Image: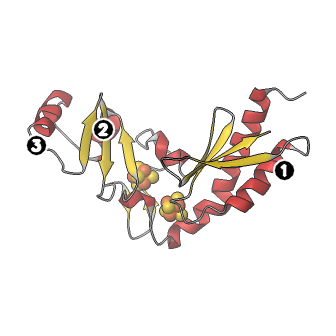
Amino acid sequence: MHSRHRLAKKLATAAAAYQVAAVNPHCGECTKPCCRLDPLVLELDWQQLKGLWQLDESHRDFDRRLTAGNGPPEIRAQDGIYYAHRKTCPAYDEVHRTCRVYNQPLKPAGCTDFPVYEDQGDVIADLRCEAVDLATLTDGLARAVGPAFHIVQSADTEFPFMVTLSVE
Ligand code: SF4
Ligand code: SF4
């Protein structure tokens, strides 16, 4: 009998394989690159913000500047986390359509997960990425977990572009 843990691992592997096979090859010709951060929001810790935005001031000085309204207008802070929105990520190479911090610690986890990732035994697909095809993704997940299970789809009521694919 499959444990939930084993199933989750299979889903995570299938989700990662889908990204490699179906999403990554499309990034070079994408009409709405996610790294332009519109409509996507990038979530960062201080080290990532400091590195990506090449800030040379202290954490405290930056927070003071941001609170005073003199920080980068695309950055908001809440509970020690920073959110970048509506301006292209400084690590995005527009010419080659690639991430300059690919595979480096500076790259936020949310970038690696987008647009398809496993979360607590489900797979989440973000339809704001034009490369995501739910039917193909669902087929791949079904193959990964085997014929004893099937994949059920549900959309988030508040954010309908976020689709959850669950195993039953
Ligand atoms: S939105 Fe999707 S296809 Fe477009 S650049 Fe991002 S991951 Fe690649
Ligand atoms: S860190 Fe890389 S993947 Fe993430 S938004 Fe910036 S350019 Fe895109």
The 10 Å Cα crowd at callout 2, few under 14, some 14 to 19, many 20 or more, is some
**Residue 100 appears in the rendering:** no
Q: Residue type at mark 1?
A: Arg
Residue at 57% x, 68% y is 26
Q: Element type at marker 2?
A: strand
Q: Find the distance from the CA under tag 1 to the CA under tag 2.
A: 38 Å
- Residue 75 located left or right of residue 100: left
Determine if the C-beta at disc 1 is less than 8 A from ligand 1.
no
Residue at 37% x, 61% y is 36
Q: Which residue is mark 3?
A: 69
Compare marks 1 and 2 and give the one earlier in the sequence: 2
Residue nearest the viewer, comparing 55 with 155: 155
Tags 3 and 2 touching, CB below 8 Å: no
Q: Element type at marker 1?
A: helix
The label number, if any, that marks residue 143 in the structure image = 1
Expressed as whole percent of the image width and height from the top left, the position of residue 87 reads 29, 58
- Residue 81: image quadrant is top left
Q: Residue type at mark 2?
A: Tyr
Residue nearest the viewer, comparing 143 with 160: 160
Q: Quadrant of the C terminus?
A: top right
Expressed as whole percent of the image width and height from the top left, the position of residue 75 reads 25, 45
- Residue 46 located left or right of residue 111: left
Expressed as whole percent of the image width and height from the top left, the position of residue 9 reads 73, 35
Compare marks 1 and 3 and give the one earlier in the sequence: 3
Q: Which residue is mark 2?
A: 82
